[in-house]
Image (cartoon, rainbow, N blue to C red):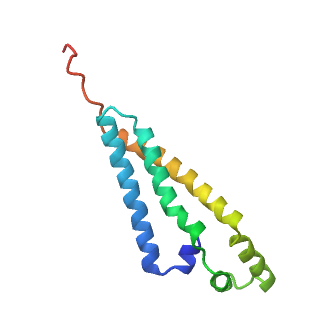
Amino acid sequence: MAHLVLGTTAASLISEILDLAMIALVITAGIRAKRASLRPVGVGVVMGLIYAFLSGIANIVKTPSSVQLSQALHKEVPSLSPAEIHHMVAISTSLGARIAMFVVGILVGLVMGIVFSWIGSLFTRPPQDHRQVV
């Protein structure tokens, strides 16, 4: 959320494009996994976790400054008092909040990997066993 509020339009657009590319990759991985007689959901879980870890680690390492957040909050919600803005900024910049956002991001990546790889596996059939009698 801070990225969308504080970031430029180009950065937000790039982020959205990367998310859509990840969804396409997970769907493709689900298709390929089913063709290779692998478990598409397992492949999706791994891909979702890797993507969520890489995209979420930046929230722990680098956070927006308190000044940036308070300016953005004041701009977006002018009805908030300075004390409320200060309280919200203090909570959002705490290490606990950043770790919680990271964990939630990992869970979302896991669920997205499962769902989109499963959807991808619906678009193909498993390979035929050549030993079958027709």
Query: Going 71% across and 63% down the picture, which residue do you hit?
Result: 96
In this view, 120 is above or below 37:
below
- In the displayed image of the protein, which residue is found farthest to the front? 61
Of residues 35 and 90, the one nearer the viewer is 90
- Please indicate whether residue 53 sits to the left or right of residue 79 in the image: left
Indicate the position of residue 93 as horizontal and vertical percent values.
68, 73
Query: Going 74% across and 71% down the picture, which residue do you hit?
Result: 91
Count of marks placed on residues: 0
Indicate the position of residue 88 as horizontal and vertical percent values.
74, 75
The image quadrant where one finds the N terminus is bottom right
Visible residue check, residue 129: yes
- In the displayed image of the protein, which residue is found farthest to the right? 83
Query: Going 62% across and 84% down the picture, which residue do you hit?
Result: 68
Indicate the position of residue 84 as horizontal and vertical percent values.
78, 79
Q: Quadrant of residue 86?
A: bottom right
Query: Going 36% across and 54% down the picture, which residue do you hit?
Result: 24
- Please indicate whether residue 25 sits to the left or right of residue 77 in the image: left
- In the displayed image of the protein, which residue is found farthest to the top? 133
Visible residue check, residue 123: no
In this view, 80 is above or below 46:
below
Q: Quadrant of residue 64?
A: bottom right
- Please indicate whether residue 59 sits to the left or right of residue 22 in the image: right
The image quadrant where one finds the C terminus is top left
